[in-house]
Amino acid sequence: MGMAPDGHHIRMMEPGEAERLLLLGTNAGLFGAVEPDIGDVVRWLVRHEVFVAETAAGRDGARLSGFAAGRDATDLYWIAGLAVDPAFRGIGLRKSLLAAVVARAGWFFHRAVGLAATKGEEADWFRRRRFLAVSADDGPEHLQRLRRERPGFDSLASDPAGTDDLVGSERIVMIHWL
């Protein structure tokens, strides 16, 4: 796609990469305290479009350096996970993966891109990239989505009883209008 920093490229996920993506997501802290098994990860991955960043092939072959998982939602394109291997942080991979997802959403005429971010440094990073926090007054559908999302791993974090109290929650929904 031509969006990745030097020495990397971004492509779509290929069959057989689930174990490597699980390891990368775990190392990057994407799944939080949840320890997903490979079956859960495969089910999660196939429900999303997964953009993969990898190093250019060298003597040791290409190495996965990050990924973003997103999907069409009824009103926007939802980013369910964004992870960069700690060994590759600080070179612009997270920004490049986000740009690839936003470009994809624009190509398919979505009005916005949404995600759940942790308050503080992570939310500030997205704010600098034109994401806006959604308040409780902006509509219950976004808050319902937040209740279902864990940092990057929504299928394991759902609250079956719907009893999450979002007042004081460390997660917020953020939207980037296209």
Image (cartoon, rainbow, N blue to C red):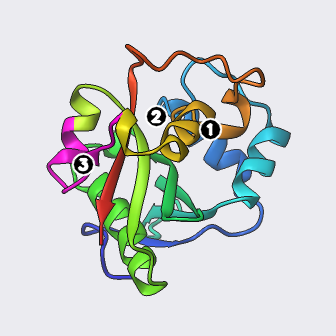
**For the point 19% across and 55% down, which residue is it?**
129
Q: How far from the left and from the top, in percent, is residue 60? A: 52, 59
Quadrant where the C terminus lies?
bottom left
Amino acid type assigned to the residue bearing label 3 in the image: Leu
Amino acid type assigned to the residue bearing label 1 in the image: Phe
Amino acid type assigned to the residue bearing label 2 in the image: Ala
The image shows residue 162, relative to residue 131, as above or below, that is above
Q: Is residue 159 left or right of residue 141?
A: right
Mark 3 or 1, closer to the camera = 3
In the image shown, does 112 or 85 lie closer to the viewer?
A: 112
The image shows residue 7, relative to residue 119, as above or below, that is below
Q: Which residue is mark 2?
A: 28
Mark 2 or 1, closer to the camera = 1
Calculate the distance from the C-alpha at mark 2 to the C-alpha at mark 1: 13 Å
Mark 2 or 3, closer to the camera = 3
Q: Which residue is mark 3?
A: 132
**For the point 73% across and 49% down, which residue is it?**
44
**For the point 59% across and 65% down, which residue is it?**
74
Q: How many residues crowd around disc 2 within 10 Å: few (fewer than 14), some, or many (20 or more)?
A: some
Say whether disc 3 or disc 1 marks the residue closer to the N-terminus. Answer: 3
Task: Residue 172: tell me if it is visible.
Answer: yes
Q: Which residue is mark 1?
A: 153
Quadrant where the N terminus lies?
bottom left
Q: Is residue 177 magenta?
A: no
Q: Pointers 2 and 3 in contact (CB under 8 A)? A: no
Q: How many residues crowd around disc 3 within 10 Å: few (fewer than 14), some, or many (20 or more)?
A: some
Q: How far from the left and from the top, in percent, is residue 147? A: 58, 31
Farthest residue to the right: give it. Answer: 39
Q: Which residues are magenta?
A: 124-135
